[in-house]
């Protein structure tokens, strides 16, 4: 009985950690977007970006995120696990 309670408490703690991590990540992204918008609004005369430069920066950022994700998947062998998942579910 005592071990079952410990396992349950451990699962609750893990769930809370995941939830906290999700909220923290969301808050960081919102803060980053808010900061970038404020920088753009209040320092518009200093920032001389045209639409093409901004879109190129967004594309470069997106490509770097994709490359980062691909390297993590390759390093952690997640691709093999993902391929085996349908077989494990059956």
Image: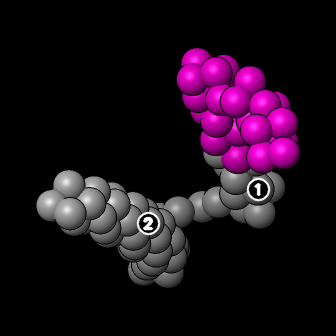
Prevailing secondary structure class for the magenta stretch in the rendered image: helix
Q: Residue 90 — which label?
A: none
Inspect this view and state whether residue 32 appears: no
The answer to which of 68 and 39 lies nearer the viewer is 68
Element marked by disc 2: helix
Quadrant containing the C terminus is: top right
Determine whether, in the image, residue 1 is placed left or right of residue 89.
left
Give above or below for 37 relative to 15.
below
Residue 5 rendering spot, x and y as whole percentages: 22, 65
Q: Is residue 59 above or below residue 20?
A: above
Q: Residue at x 15, y 61 (%)?
A: 2
Q: Residue at x 76, y 38 (%)?
A: 88
Residue 18's quadrant in the figure? bottom left
- Which is more toward the observer, 34 or 5? 5
Residue wearing tag 2: 22
Is 53 displayed left or right of 90 in the figure? Answer: left
Residue 87 magenta-highlighted = yes
Point out the stretch of residues depicted in magenta. Answer: 62-90
Residue highlighted by disc 1: 55
Camera-side residue of 11 and 78: 11
2 left or right, relative to 17: left
Residue 34 screen position, x and y as percent: 45, 77
Q: Is 12 within the magenta? A: no
Q: Name the residue located 26 percent from the left edge and 60 percent from the top edge.
A: 4
Q: Is residue 41 left or right of residue 73?
A: left
Mark 2 or 1, nearer chain start: 2
- Mark 1 lies on a secondary structure that is helix
Within the image, what quadrant is residue 9 found in? bottom left
* Residue sitting at x 83%, y 36%: 87
Nearest the eye: 16 or 39: 16
- Of the 4 image quadrants, the one containing the N terminus is bottom left
Around disc 1, counting alpha carbons within 10 Å, would you say few (fewer than 14), some (14 to 19), or many (20 or more)?
A: few
């Amino acid at each position: 009985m005592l071990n079952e309670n410990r396992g349950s408490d451990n699962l609750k703690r893990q769930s809370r950690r995941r939830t906290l991590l999700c909220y923290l990540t969301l808050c960081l992204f919102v803060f980053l977007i808010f900061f970038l918008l404020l920088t753009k609004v209040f320092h518009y005369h200093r920032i001389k970006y045209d639409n093409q430069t901004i879109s190129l920066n967004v594309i470069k950022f997106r490509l770097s995120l994709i490359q980062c994700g691909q390297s993590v998947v390759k390093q952690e062998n997640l691709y093999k696990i993902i391929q085996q998942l349908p077989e494990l579910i059956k």
